[in-house]
Image (cartoon, helix red, strand yellow):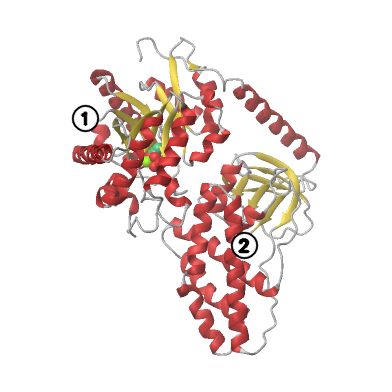
Amino acid sequence: MSPPPDDQGPDHIGRPASSGLIDGPIVRLEVPIAGRHETSGDPATERALLAAAIGSATEQIAALTELGDVETGAILEFQTVMLEDEALSEPAYSSIGRGSGAAAAWREALGGQIEDYQAADDEYFRARAADLIDLRDRVLRNLAGEGLSGHRPGAILIGDDLTPTRFLETDWSQGGGVALAHGNPSSHAAMLARSRGIPMVTGLGFGNLDGHERALLDGDSGHLILSPNANQLAGFSEKVRQADALRQQADAYLARPAVTPDGTPIAMMVNIADPDEVDGIDVNICDGVGLMRSEFLFHRCSHLPDEEQQYQAYRKVLQWAGDRPVTIRTVDAGGDKPIAGLTIEESNPFLGLRGIRLSLIHRDIFKAQLRALARAGMHGNLKIMLPMVSVPAELETAAQLLDECVAELTAQDTEAVRPPVGIMVEVPAVAIMPELFSAAAFLSIGSNDLTQYVMAASREGDAVAALHDPGQPAVLSLIKRVCQYGGKSGIHVSLCGEAGGDPAHIGALLEAGLRTLSVAPAAMARAKMAIADTDLEAGDG
Ligand code: PEP
Ligand code: MG
């Protein structure tokens, strides 16, 4: 390869974390703050100053929580819990007692914890190090009376790593982007960027940024071009034009029913997490809710939601959907979704107490959810779905518990229905022998987990991302087997994993026999466009 011409801006490649293209001025993420707090030399004063700085941090985080959505709530809850944990602040107070100033003591106390998180085997815990850095810097800023460094709306934030609260405090109303030398696509900041549609690339490994003022960032290919020249700018504008044209083309499909060129209708459902999400979705773009991940309700508050809170949340979604079916999945905690007070720490949580396994242990919590669902079922077309089922006994027990809940509610003169109960097909044991689950009212294939378990490739890790491929023949043959069983038995089969919204996989999924897909609302237009372009072989369906 010939070296680039001198005037060509350096082009770095990293790991795409959130899709989209942005051309903008760069703003350096602030260099770690010094926490310029002069020590008074008096331990009692330093202790009081630290306590006040921690108290202000708690208030600032609470104010951010008010602004955010359900994912934001979960992220900030981690920080609030950490701030309230005396184990975090105690070492700092002790070193103040030994003569340290508040800032030095806090920096040192947090330093050890941050290193522990950074060295964790588990990617989830490594990603939480950014939360702790965020907490460290927030309290130091409070001690020093410093505010955030300025941000230019529409700019590309560039630096080592990005904390979730820095993301939340940034004004994204005019777009912008994030380019990080390090960072991790599973971090909370990356999750926030994806949910807000802010392009982000991690692991760019750039060095000195001096002299650069403008950059081009491609969140799909992972490229960052610093100080672009005229050719690079022209190439990028062309990419932006193509992406806009593709989006407009896809948007034209949004309001139409999904149908293949031979006229085969495909039911298109949406996946949601937070009940408030439906406020931003036109119900006419979908045929119902194929998956409501109820565990996100459990992340929303610092305590588990009670029956009444759940009832209100489920009823809201059912009323929004009208006659359309709404499939609400019972709590799928565990794996990558730990919930304080519910899940346990395990060395391999994806193979541990997850989903229905956990619900059947915490029967009080499970019954509160089933009661809320049976009551909410009065307000629409509700189906209940069980996650991570591996053996028929789990379905039987859950169905019995639901019957008990409905009987109890009826005995108390509380209006309730007994919704049909179906299962996720995400454990290979179910996909291999679906006939054992003939008691299920419906089957919904969770291709995210099914792929992870069939291919023995984590759905999170970057290193085996190529193996976590729902297009692998082994995964597709299991999907086909489940569809064939559905055809023979009359049990409805759908798919609610990410593959259903991915144009690269839609053709193979329809070929495997699927006629109902449930996808993220943002993926709906492109999925419908891909369906309109999928020729099914004669005789399928
Ligand atoms: C799946 O596993 O495909 C699925 C839809 O469930 P989740 O992604 O919530 O595990
Ligand atoms: Mg799953």
Query: Which residue is found at the position 56% from the left and 35% from the top?
Result: 279
The circle drawn on residue 60 is 2
The number of numbered discs placed on residues in the rendered structure image is 2
Q: Is residue 477 left or right of residue 523?
A: left
Residue placed furthest toward the front? 413
Quarter of the image where one finds residue 421: top left
Q: Secondary structure at mark 2?
A: helix
Picture coordinates of residue 231 (x, y %)? 78, 37
Q: Amino acid at mark 2?
A: Gln
Q: Is residue 143 left or right of residue 505?
A: right
Q: Secondary structure at mark 1?
A: loop
Quarter of the image where one finds residue 42: bottom right
Q: Which residue is mark 1?
A: 439
Q: Is residue 296 above or below residue 324?
A: below
Query: Which residue is found at the position 47% from the left and 28% from the top?
Result: 321
The 10 Å Cα crowd at callout 1, few under 14, some 14 to 19, many 20 or more, is: some
Q: Amino acid at mark 1?
A: Ala
